[in-house]
Image (cartoon, grey):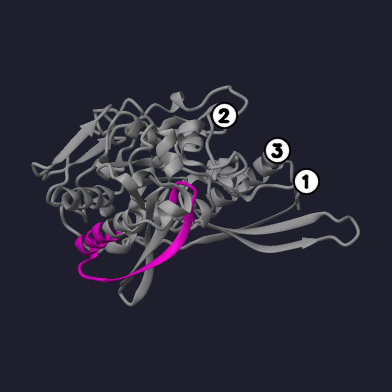
Amino acid sequence: MMMTAATFRRGVVSAFQIGRRQPTSISRNFVATTTTARFSTSSSSETSSYANPDRYTGDHPQNNIPPHIAALVGRGLHEKEDHPLGIINAKINEYFASLEGEEYEFFLGEDPIVTTKQCFDDLRIPPDHPGRQPSDTYYLSDTQLLRTHTSAHQSQHLRDGHETFLCAGDVYRRDEIDASHYPAFHQLEGVKLFPKNDQHSLTGDEWLQSDECKAIGDDLKKTLEGLMDHLFGPVEKKWSSDYFPFTEPSLECEILYDGEWLEVLGCGVVHTEVLDMAGRGDRRGWAFGLGLERLAMILFGIPDIRLFWTEDTRFHKQFKAGQITKFKSYSKYPPCYKDIAFWLPESGMEENDFFEVARGVAGDLVEKIDLTDEFTHPKTNRTSKCYRITYRSMDRSLTDDEINALQMELREKSASDLNVEVR
């Protein structure tokens, strides 16, 4: 159920940082639930009903979804059995299917368009939270958006009577540009409610200090430690307290892998107010969330998040269903660096808005954008920023003329769309 630390501390895991084809192996205690078919690739003859860019762009004054984002929706990368994300997704399903005495439903194919109530209000995310701002979130209207985390579907599942389930899907957030950030990515989360107990009527500190709350937290840790061993082999784990609006207490898990401590997921005991709003105030349970790209980059050794979206066969032929194999780099193409500097308008500028303009102009040819200089003029009090843009294709060499044309377009679009004064 979670937005994960990524929403509060960028670039870590899922929304607690999550189709129609079932995993290749499903045991008798695992139920796969599909709502609407979402399996598609750009080259497939079968097209997801959600892979329709016109569905996400429109004339509403609050709509801030550009064409390059609308074109990503419905690709279903986590459903492809030979794709790294699909392989990780299937291995997680395999683990939960193996748990004795538990039956997990698996939800796929849910509409990526959700309401602000689903995505924020039902999870106790306050109106002034930065994650709700248009600089962070893709809105279709005042009340509809592309989900920023798969937790947006959690409360509805609870209202509908589901008690033990997993969700996986594509999510969307405006973000910085580097090797580990992309505006579309994939999450998986899990929720488990426990049988009714007399202590479930407790709230506040009484509940947090109860034996039942501790028992639920212990079960959560045991379950997720087993998942980490299933994915990475036996590894050392470390738990630390964290904060999420939708769980209390909240925890973060790190593993020691290849000599380095890595944050892999966020989790916690579901907040009693979240359960109350979902009509399940008489029950208690846990939830966790993780980012599929995060795990895949670690396990497969994939250095750049853009690679998950490539159609280059040199990438895809390296992976097979059910197998974890280290990625072998095939890109030797050199980077091209360009700087852009501008005076900010008096009203200021959200960096994510500039990053979005850059993505709109150059797409995945933008590898990274770094702020290299910032100063405020002592007399005019105007602020100037200078950014270095790294252009690099993963598939081919870029020409000077091509990059110069993109840089010129970026200068023009920055001035017109962001009201900056390009220097």
| Residue displayed at 47% across by 50% down | 204
User: In the depicted view, which residue is nearer to us: 322 or 397?
Assistant: 322
Q: Which residue is mark 2?
A: 63
| Magenta highlight on residue 222 | yes
| Residue displayed at 62% across by 25% down | 61
Q: Which mark is residue 416?
A: 3
Q: Residues within 10 Å of mark 2 (few under 14, many from 20)?
A: some
Q: Residue furthest bottom?
A: 259
What segment carries the magenta color? 221-247
Q: Which residue is mark 1?
A: 345
Considering only vertical position in the picture, is 233 above or below 387?
Answer: below
Q: Locate residue 228: give its quadrant.
A: bottom left
Compare marks 3 and 1 and give the one earlier in the sequence: 1
| Residue 292 screen position, x and y as percent | 33, 52
- Secondary structure at badge 2 equals loop
User: In the depicted view, which residue is nearer to us: 177 or 415?
Assistant: 177
Eye-nearest disc, 3 or 2: 2
- Secondary structure at badge 3 equals helix
Eye-nearest disc, 1 or 2: 2
- The residue type indicated by label 1 comes to Pro
Q: CA distance from mark 3 to mark 1?
A: 12 Å
Q: Is residue 55 left or right of residue 196?
A: right
| Residue 106 screen position, x and y as percent | 23, 39
Considering only vertical position in the picture, is 182 above or below 231?
Answer: above
